[in-house]
Image: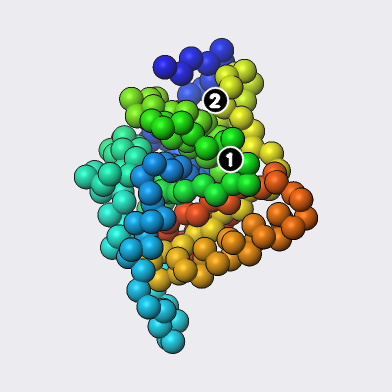
Amino acid sequence: MFHFALRIRNKLPYGQRKFHDIQRLAFVVDNHYGLLDKLKQQTIPASHVETMSKFPSSYARNLLHPFSKHLVSTYASNYYKKATPYYGEFPLQFFASELYSLDASIVDTEHTHSVILYPEQIRISNIEKEHIPYITRLCSNEYVPELVESNDSRIEKMEGINIYFFCDVDTFDRTTLLCQWFAHCFSSSNYDKVNFFLVVVISKMGKIRV
């Protein structure tokens, strides 16, 4: 179980939010689900006409469904049952993600997963499924940056360069090509402190800033 030598001040309930609060994104990295392989199976031939729809595909939306096998659905279930939106927006949003890294040492072990918190760029790793309710509460806390002071090896401030690629069924192929191009450029420059997060769009993108 996670035990932090840390006092989180003024812990906020799920429902409270002020207008000036920073929107936080939580990227649930479950590399054992095979998210990108499953997304690849859903891809459709690229149309010559660019779609104007900003809504995610049915596959992407279903990732948040309680019966989804991706762990992001468990986080969403824990959070949205108690959270209160502010003018239709939640202060915390969860996204199903998969990690590509030039440093293989940061990939989680067989039965665990990670959560990346943005904009703080904090990674909580080696999370067991039974820890999810506790991690969900941590993600909702106003003082998340203080977590890095806990001296817990599973919590770290992510250094180097972190690039987030948002994609869906109709943009997956182009996104992976772009990711590979970035990886090639960094590798050619002998720079390995870079992580690529391929994130499936499961909500409207218009109000997300990364």
Residue at 54% of width from left, 25% of height from top?
A: 154
Relative to 5, 57 lies left or right:
left
Q: Mark 1 belongs to which amino acid?
A: Ala
Pick whichever of labels 2 and 1 is earlier in the sequence. Answer: 1
Task: Read off the residue under disc 2.
Answer: 154
Residue at 34% of width from left, 29% of height from top?
A: 129
Residue at 36% of width from left, 69% of height from top?
A: 43
Can you see residue 171? yes
Q: Which residue lies furthest to the bottom in this view?
A: 48
Residue at 36% of width from left, 45% of height from top?
A: 33
The mark lying in front, picked from 2 and 1, is 1
Can you say whether 110 is above or below 192 in the image? above
Q: In which quarter of the image is residue 171?
A: bottom left
- Residue 110 or residue 47, whichever sits in front: 110
Can you see residue 93? no
- Residue 190 location in percent, x, y? 76, 50
Q: In which quarter of the image is the C terminus?
A: bottom right
Can you say whether 50 is above or below 124 in the image? below
Q: Residue furthest right?
A: 189
Helix, strand or loop under label 2:
loop
Q: Quadrant of the N terminus?
A: top left
Residue 15's label in the rendered image is none
Dot 2 and dot 1 residues touching (CB under 8 Å) = no
Q: Mark 2 belongs to which amino acid?
A: Arg
- Residue 41 location in percent, x, y? 33, 63
Helix, strand or loop under label 1:
helix
Label 2 – label 1 distance at C-alpha: 16 Å
- Residue 206 location in percent, x, y? 48, 63
- Residue 208 or residue 97, whichever sits in front: 97
Task: Read off the residue under disc 1.
Answer: 104
- Residue 134 location in percent, x, y? 39, 25
Mark 2 Cα within 10 Å, few/some/many (few <14, many 20+)? Answer: some
